[in-house]
Structure formats: structure tokens, C-alpha cells
Image (cartoon, helix red, strand yellow):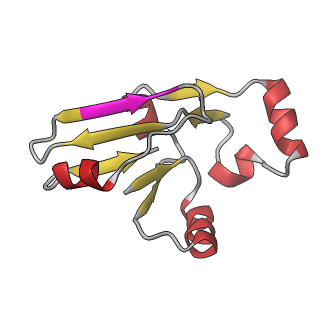
Amino acid sequence: MGVSPDRPAKLQETATKHKLGFRLLSDSQMIAAKSFRVTYQVDEATLKQLSGYGVDLEEASGETHHLLPVPAVFVIGTDGLIRFEYVNPAYRVRLALSGSFRSRCFGLVIAES
């Protein structure tokens, strides 16, 4: 399962375009991201830069908060406790989830942002 800051309609576009093989949930108001403490405020210079790339955070999220989540992976046990977490503010560095890691997580829910 993945969690995205995009609004639900935008998620449908993404899922169709990229043929995602997992469920993608919207957190456009950043409620979950704030709860997991993985948000950061996008400054005006970065907003302008993103706009130059054709990325409009307000259009994508439907919100004006200008927040984004840092890349994060949480493994949550069926008892609701966090069993593993990986949070890295360097957005280009992502955790590679190998098949053996996924196998060890049997019975657990994997949520990525």
C-alpha cells in the first residue's frame, strides 16, 4: 500500500498511467504524514522550480499547505505497532524492499509514502 499527498482524482490518473500493482491512498490534507512526522514545508523558491517542471502542488493535492512527505517506509504489525521504519529526508535515496524482506513481513501491512 502506498500513501500519497495527491488528491484522490489525481491518484487515479497516476495508478492508470503507471499501472500500479498496489493500493494507493490519498493523504492530501497530510493528516497521516503529520502523524508519522514525515512532512516538510516547500519554500517559495522550490515551488517556483517545481512549477517550471510542470508540477503544481496545489492542483495535485487540492490544498494550499505546500507540504510534502519525505520518503518513508513503515512496517506496521497486525497489533498496530510500528515494527520497522525508514525515513530519509534525501528524497532521491529510497529503500529497496527485497523479496526476502517482504517475505519476513508476512502478516504485516507495508505503508510507503
Dominant SS in magenta: strand
Quarter-of-image position of residue 99: bottom left
Seen in the picture, residue 25 relative to 47 is either above or below; the reply is: below
User: Residue 44 occupies which quadrant of the picture?
Assistant: top right
Q: How many marks?
A: 0
Q: Residue at x 56, y 34 (%)?
A: 93
Q: Which residues are magenta?
A: 84-88
Q: Residue at x 80, y 34 (%)?
A: 47
Viewer-nearest residue: 59 or 103:
103
Judge whether 81 appears above or below 51 on screen.
above
Residue in view at x 54 percent, y 32 percent: 70
Residue 65: x %, y % from top left:
64, 34
Q: Residue 110: x, y in percent? A: 30, 50
Query: Camera-side residue: 3 or 107?
Result: 107
Question: Does the magenta portion include 96?
Answer: no
The residue nearer to you, when weighing 43 against 110, is 110
Does residue 57 appear to the left or right of 9 in the view shown? Answer: right
Left or right of 56 on screen, residue 5? left
